[in-house]
Amino acid sequence: MVHASNKEALNIALNFFKGNVVLSLSAIAILLVVALLKQVPVVGIVFALIYPILSFAIQIYLAREVPRLQNPEEMEALAQRTKLSELFTRHLDIAAGGFLGFFLIITLLGMLFAGLMSASIDVQTAEQAMRSQDIQEMIVAISTGGALGTLFFFLILLMWLGYLMPGVMGEVLLAPTFMDAFRKSFLLFNPRFWKRTFTKEYFVLIMIWSFIVFFAALILSWIAVSILLLPVALVGVYFLSLYNAVIYVFAQKALSRG
C-alpha cells in the first residue's frame, strides 16, 4: 500500500480523475441531474435519498482499490478500465447500508438536539421575539433558558464526531456487506473505537485533512456563486469527494496499526 499521507491522497485522487476524464465528467453530470431532480415536488424526496447513495458508491469504488496500490500512478490504469455503470453500481449495496446507518444517526442527533433545545429555551420569550422579530429578545430567550449550554454541548459533540468520522468512514467503505456497512457506522458511539484514534499518525492525518477540506469548501462555495464558474465548482466538489475517500482508507489503516 502507498504511504498514507494527505499528499499521496491528493495524488491518488488526481490520477483517478485524469486517468479517465470522460468517466469523471459523466459521473458529475449524472450527479448534477439527480441533484436537480431533488427539487421536483413529491418525487424529489426519492432523489434526495438516491443522490448520497450514488455519491457514496463512487467513494467506495475508489477506496477499495487503494490498499492494492503500490504507487499513485496505478490509479490511472484503474480509471481507464472503469465503466460508468461499474462506478455507480458495483458497491451500491454497501453504499446503501452505510447511508442508512448515518441517516439514522443524523436523525437521532437531530431529535436529541431539538428536544434539548425545546426543554432549555425560554419558550414564552422566544415566541414573543418571533412575533416581534426582535433579535435581542431572541438572544435573551436563548441565554436565560440555558440553551447556550445546549448549543455549546452540541458544538463539542460535533467536533468530536468530526474527528472520529474519517476512521468510521474508512471502516464503512471497506465493509464487505450491506449489514456490515450499516453496523460499522455506529462505531461513532463505541468507546473502544474512540481509544484507537488516540494515535499521533491518525491525529496528524486528520488535522491536516480537516484544514484542507475547510479551505477547499470555502473556495468552492465562493466559486459556486458565479454561474460561469459553477462547472469548476462541480469538478472541485467531485475531486474533493475522491480525495476524502482515500483519506478515509488511510485513516482506517492508521487505526489498524494503532
Image (cartoon, grey):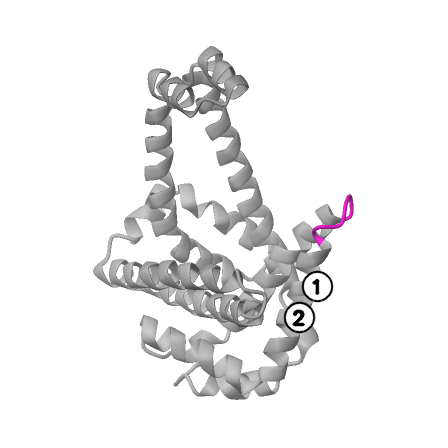
- In front: 89, or 212? 212
Residue 6, by quadrant, is bottom left
Magenta-span inclusion, residue 11: no
Question: Residue 97: where, in percent of width, then height?
Answer: 60, 53
Is residue 35 at all visible to an observer of this figure?
yes
Q: Are marks 1 and 2 in contact (CB under 8 Å)?
A: yes
- In front: 215, or 133? 133
**In the displayed image of the protein, which residue is found farthest to the left?**
200
In the visual, does 71 lie left or right of 22?
left
Q: Helix, strand, or loop for circle 1?
A: helix
- In front: 228, or 174? 228
Q: Residue at x 53, y 30 (%)?
A: 111
Question: Residue 121: where, in percent of width, then height?
Answer: 42, 18
Residue 68, by quadrant, is bottom left
**Where residue 150 is drawn, which disc sits there?**
none
Magenta-span inclusion, residue 40: yes
Relative to 165, is 31 above or below? below
Question: Residue 229: where, in percent of width, then height?
Answer: 54, 70
Q: Residue at x 40, y 80 (%)?
A: 11
Which secondary structure class fits the magenta region best?
A: loop
Q: Helix, strand, or loop for circle 2?
A: helix
